[in-house]
Image (cartoon, rainbow, N blue to C red):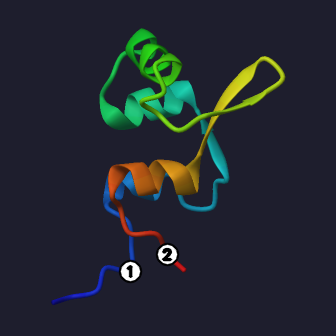
């Protein structure tokens, strides 16, 4: 079995970021903006609210996707 130490190319855009916007997640997942906001509203995406902004913590998103998290 081979240990994965790097992220897949689409997920590489997340490296070095703590949070991303719903729009960024929508693009990454191939969803429309409205569908991504609806998934967040239903609790299907891990989100945190900061004032009026809705952010997605990258570690929680990677875990949700089942992607390897670099230590």
Considering only order in the chain, which callout, 2 or 1, is on the residue closer to the N terminus? 1
Q: CA distance from mark 1 to mark 2?
A: 6 Å
In which quadrant is the C terminus drawn?
bottom right
Task: Using residue 46 as the reference point, say whether residue 55 is left or right of it.
Answer: right
Q: Is residue 17 above or below residue 39?
A: below
Q: Is residue 5 above or below residue 23?
A: below
Query: Which residue shows up at 46% across the image and 69% down it?
Result: 69
Q: Residue furthest bottom?
A: 1
Crowding at dot 2, Cα within 10 Å, few <14 / some 14-19 / many 20+, comes out as: few
Query: Which residue shows up at 42% across the image and 30% down it?
Result: 44
Q: Which dot marks residue 5?
A: 1
Query: Which residue shows up at 38% across the image and 66% down it?
Result: 7
Q: Position of residue 11 (x, y in %)?
A: 40, 54
| Residue hosting label 2 | 70
Q: Which dot marks residue 26?
A: none
Task: Using residue 32 as the reference point, say whether residue 51 is left or right of it.
Answer: right
- Find out whether the residues at labels 1 and 2 contact each other: C-beta distance under 8 Å: yes
Where, by quadrant of the figure, is residue 30 drawn? top left
Task: Using residue 17 as the reference point, say whether residue 71 is left or right of it.
Answer: left
Callout 2 secondary element? loop
Callout 1 secondary element? loop
In which quadrant is the N terminus drawn?
bottom left
Crowding at dot 1, Cα within 10 Å, few <14 / some 14-19 / many 20+, comes out as: few
Q: Is residue 40 above or below residue 62?
A: above
Q: Residue furthest front?
A: 43
């Amino acid at each position: 079995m081979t240990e994965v130490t790097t992220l897949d190319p689409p997920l590489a855009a997340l490296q070095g970021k703590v949070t991303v916007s719903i729009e960024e997640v929508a693009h990454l997942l191939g969803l429309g903006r409205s569908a991504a906001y609806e998934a967040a509203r239903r609790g299907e995406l891990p989100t945190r609210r900061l004032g009026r902004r809705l952010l997605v913590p990258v570690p929680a998103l990677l875990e949700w996707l089942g992607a390897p998290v670099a230590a």
